[in-house]
Amino acid sequence: MTFWDGKQILLTGGAGFLGSHIVEQLGQKGINKDYLYIPRSRDLDLRKWENCVKAVKGKDIVIHLAGKVGGIGFNQKYPGGLFYDNAMMGIQLIEAARQEGVEKCVIIGTVCAYPKFTPVPFSEDELWNGYPEETNAPYGLAKKMLLVQAQAYRQQYGFNAIYLLPVNLYGPRDNFNPESSHVIPALIKKFVEAVQEKRPVVEIWGTGNASREFLYVEDAARAIVLATERYNKPEPVNLGAGQEISIKELVKIIQKYTGYTGNIHWDTSKPDGQPRRCLVTSRAEKEFGFVAKVPFDVGLRRTVEWYVNRSDE
């Protein structure tokens, strides 16, 4: 018998970027798709209570990935919607799962929950020592409330909910929509189009001085599956690769992989977002044996190749 045998699984957001890779990981575990329920938002709006009740009915495991999410511009444009949608989906789904007697609930949080000036690298113990970076605070705080809920429910009801904090993800099948994409897909799209259209200059938001850490999506999916199998404690757990890179350096690498030879213009009137991001990743290794495997340059090259091949179709 394995952990997954006979278990009915709800995977919200399972048709999205990260979700599609988790489906593949579960398939490698031999999980029959009859045991995996992936509701689409157009069919089941999880902001409505009755739909959350319907989604968890008869389920043993809930993995909650679904969310409204985007980059800095998207966060600035839709702060209210990001707060409401993410809070309502998560809070109601967790309560519905508790009422249904679900065996385990796995909640995917966000690195945006960390305070703006968290000492680098970010330790899980620093999560409450300040207010998040302003441009993504409504989203980060909505997701952070699900950690409060998970810990409170464990304390009062003995409900087994765990909370994972992935750093910025990237990889094939990412969201390349310029209105809502994150930094890596946004830059790849920008440079590929600049090559195709022979643009002399590419404009990038900010100063380039901010830093980020990135986790390849296949590694993130493997981490979530491992945590579902092995982790049963109230403390949040970072999921990352433990390596930091400046946006300026990232731009240079993407420029090289896309073959763009023009000039870069930094629009310093636009925000950088959080000054630095890099995670302490030792808890994930200690608690459920997760260590990132895919080197950043390898993952980035794969992502560029995937996008170029797709845009050539």
Image (cartoon, helix red, strand yellow):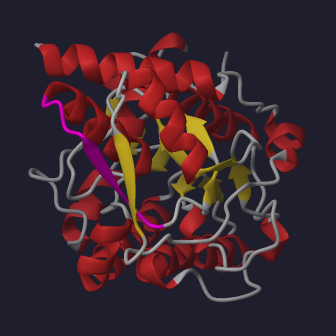
From the viewer's side, name the closer residue of 262 and 267: 262
Q: How many marks?
A: 0
Does residue 245 lie above or below 112 as drawn? above
Instruction: Check the picture and name the quadrant holding the C terminus.
Output: top left
Q: Which residue is drawn at 65% across and 73% down?
A: 114
From the viewer's side, name the closer residue of 55 and 249: 249
Instruction: Please say whether residue 201 is one of the residues in the magenta stretch.
Output: yes
Please give left or right for residue 280 compared with residue 302 in the image: right
Residue 241 appears at what percent x and percent y? Answer: 71, 39
Residue 52 appears at what percent x and percent y? Answer: 29, 63
Residue 65 visible, this angle: no
Please give left or right for residue 173 compared with residue 235 in the image: left
Say which quarter of the image contains residue 132. Answer: bottom right
Does residue 121 lie above or below 95 as drawn? above
Say which quarter of the image contains residue 131. Answer: bottom right
From the viewer's side, name the closer residue of 99 and 285: 285
Q: Which residue is drawn at 64% across and 57% down?
A: 211
Q: Which residue is drawn at 64% across and 79% down?
A: 116
Instruction: Please say whether residue 86 is one of the residues in the magenta stretch.
Output: no
Q: What residue span does the magenta drawing correspond to?
A: 197-206
Residue 249 visible, this angle: yes
Instruction: Check the picture and name the quadrant holding the N terminus.
Output: top right
